Image (spheres, grey):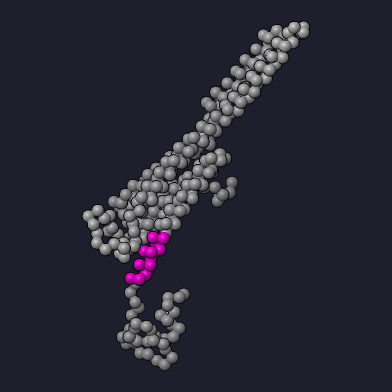
Amino acid sequence: MPLYRTLDPDQIIRTLEALELRISDRFPGAGLLAVCKELLQAASISKARIAALEAPHYVLRGISLATMVGGLLALVYIGTIIDIKRDAENLYGVLQGFDSAFNIIVLMGAGAIFLSSLESRWKRQRALEHLHELRSIIHVIDMHQLTKDPSRVSTVGVLTPNSPQRELSPFELARYLDYCSELLSLSAKVAALYAQGTRDPLVIETTSDLAQLTSNLSGKIWQKITMVQMQIGDRQPVSVVPSNWQPDAGRTPLAGAEHPIPAGSPADTDGAA
């Protein structure tokens, strides 16, 4: 079986374990760490749940098969006790009997279809319940980044007693938001495990909806990360020219510097590689 054509739940769990350690190192008392632990626990449980959903449910299959066989035997028994007479007087009664038998066969066929799909519908319901848990975790992750506003410096004049506490540096805020984005992505991967093990269209559609939800939330988070990175870039110190450096001919001055720098030198390329 090709290695990179299916999601490996063990790899997802190991990635979550590594992310938990990273969050614990930088934010040991943060609520985001507790959310990561919840997602890790949900991923571990999902591995066992998906294995159970992929395995055949012999109890439901036995009940369905026994019910269908019992219905067929009852129909055969009814047919054996009917006394069919060939005279003209009972012709109308025989036709009524055939009509009733046809209706019974149709109803039994519908019942057989219902019983044959009982196992798949039960598995679908279980998978949707598990996906609903993941949806709740996704929204909890989004709540943790909700108050992490990188534009607070320019938009908030005076803090009020009810203003959210923002004690993170720009670097720490960028890391916090990045961890939120990673948690959202891993939540979508855990949900994709359910779609990987089934062909049920409703489960696949629900998984796709969760993937779209996490993608939209991650896009919002990365807008914040971009703003933080711009703030960090604005705070970078300007390169200092050594005081003993002497200008020569053919060198262009650097705006804001006390001394010119050589044309084409690294400082003259505005950071270009």
Residue 106 percent across, percent down from the top left? 64, 23
* Residue 271, position as x, y percentages in the image: 42, 75
Task: In the displayed orientation, state which residue is furthest to the left.
Answer: 161
Looking at the image, how many numbered discs can be counted on the residues?
Answer: 0
Majority SS type along the magenta span: helix
The spot of residue 122 in percent (x, y) is: 51, 32
Q: Is residue 208 above or below residue 114?
A: below
Report the residue at 47% width, 53% height from top: 215
Name of the residue lying farthest toward the bottom = 249
Where residue 262 sits, quadrant-wise, is bottom left
Range drawn in magenta: 223-235
Tell me if 102 is positioned left or right of 59 in this view. right
- Residue at 50% in and 43% down: 206
In this rendered view, identify the residue nearer to me: 109 or 190: 109
Nearer to me, 273 or 253: 253
Above or below 215: residue 112: above
Can see residue 36? no
What percent of the width, then of the height, locates residue 234? 35, 71
Q: Is residue 82 shown above or below 245?
A: above
Q: Is residue 260 left or right of residue 111?
A: left
Q: Is residue 157 visible?
A: yes
Q: Residue furthest right?
A: 87
Residue at (52% x, 26% y) in the render: 59
The residue nearer to you, when weighing 15 against 87, is: 87
Q: Is residue 167 magenta?
A: no
- Residue nearest the viewer, comparing 197 with 74: 74
Instruction: Say whether residue 57 is left or right of residue 22.
Output: right
From what the image shows, is residue 241 above or below residue 44? below
At x 32%, y 85%, the residue is 258
Query: Toward which corner of the image does residue 236 lie, by quadrant?
Result: bottom left
